Amino acid sequence: MSGELLRKLLGYRGWKVWGSYDMHICLFAALYFLLLVGGEPLKTLFLLTSLGFYFMYGFLINDFFDMPFDIAAGKRRAVHELSRAAFASIIILVVAVSGLHLLYLRESSYAAVYIAAYSLATLYSAPPARLKEWGLCGIMVNGLIEKMLPALTVVAFFHVFGLDAFMLLAAAFLMGVAEIVAHQIYDYEHDVETGCQSFVTRIGKERAVALFRKFIAPTTSGALFALSVLMCIRVPLAGVVVVLTAFVYGYVAFLVRRGEWRMEEKVFPLHLSCAFRMVNNVLPLFLAFVLCFKALESVILLPLVLGSQYYVVEHRLRFLKERALLHDEITNV
């Protein structure tokens, strides 16, 4: 293996899942329930790492079966330069590590949801099913495999089935739908060129953008803000960081209106960006420090939580430097 290929492989997007929005909502869920109902921080850490390997599998299996489409669209991934045998070996290794997590955690309800998520993630990309090409059904499945089912594994692990779980799962599902529709809008030209039958290519870009802005974005923002309010009720101190986050985004909106900042993000409205940031980034950090304050053993969760925010911090520093709201997807390499 050449040094250049190794460098590309180390930068592959599938390894970045540890700092993706998929992982962030799971961090929020695990830390929130650990604070509410208690549990073992070490097992919670392994719960989260099991989800990290699940997300890695999702990208790997998707890129494996999307290889001809991606190459035709000029989106050649580093893993596409491997032989199919080497690529498949990496996938098998990730599956094996995921299995070891199941053996260690020994939690039947969690394992059942985890295996179901793995199976659906496979059917989403692999022929003959390739659910991703089933239009609206593909959008729904994506919302399940990227956000809702991983969040459900956390709910099953902690055995928390009530209002908090319902609002978390609803918000997670809507987040997944919003992300995949936005992603398909950005990829519209490439998908049309390669003949990929996505939801957006089926209904047209203009209709998809209108649907996103008028229905998907406000519904998702509402669910995320409602989840944040519920957390503030359960953990009143969280209200401080929630209000501060909303204030910062309100100030940014003011700067955009005055023309002091550029708005280059064409799909995600600012209110949705604020809601995402609140639940995915600000509140997990808040919860991690609260847990560490309550019990020193929770410190083992801190490196994962802090490390997961690396790409978000990197992107926001770019925003400040360029004084612009830029489009960014954490796992777009």
Image: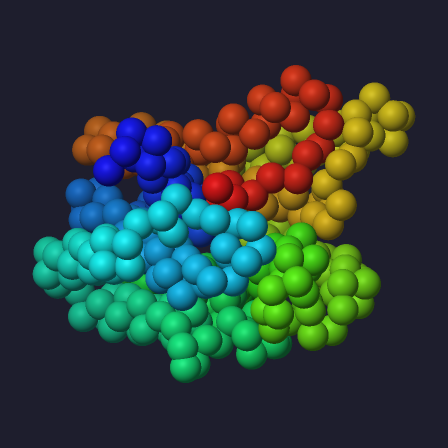
Instruction: Depth check: give the residue in front, 295 or 169.
Output: 169
Is 332 left, or right, of 250 in this rendering? left
Using the rendered image of the protein, determine whether residue 128 is visible from the camera's viewpoint.
yes
Does 166 appear above or below 104?
Answer: below
Q: Residue at 22% across / 67% down in the picture? A: 111
- Residue 152 occupies which quadrant of the picture? bottom left
Out of 274 and 58, give the one closest to the viewer. 58
* Residue 228 in view (yes/no): no
Residue 317, image x and y in percent? 58, 22
Q: Position of residue 319 (x, y in %)?
A: 65, 26
Picture layout, residue 132 above or below residue 51? below
Q: How many marks?
A: 0
Q: Position of residue 187 (x, y in %)?
A: 64, 56
| Residue under the point 56% across and 43% down | 329
**In the rendered view, does 279 fall on the left or right side of 77?**
right
Q: Position of residue 263 (x, y in %)?
A: 78, 35
Residue drawn at the location 12% of the way across and 57% of the way down: 100
Outermost residue on the top side: it is: 321
Residue at 59% from the left image edge and 69% from the top image edge: 196
Position of the N terminus by quadrant = top left
Q: Residue furthest right?
A: 258
Left or right of 26, for residue 278: right
The colouring scheme, among rainbow, by chain, secondary structure or one colour, is: rainbow
User: Would residue 145 be found to the left or right of residue 157 on screen?
Assistant: right
Residue lying at the far bottom in this picture: please name it.
128
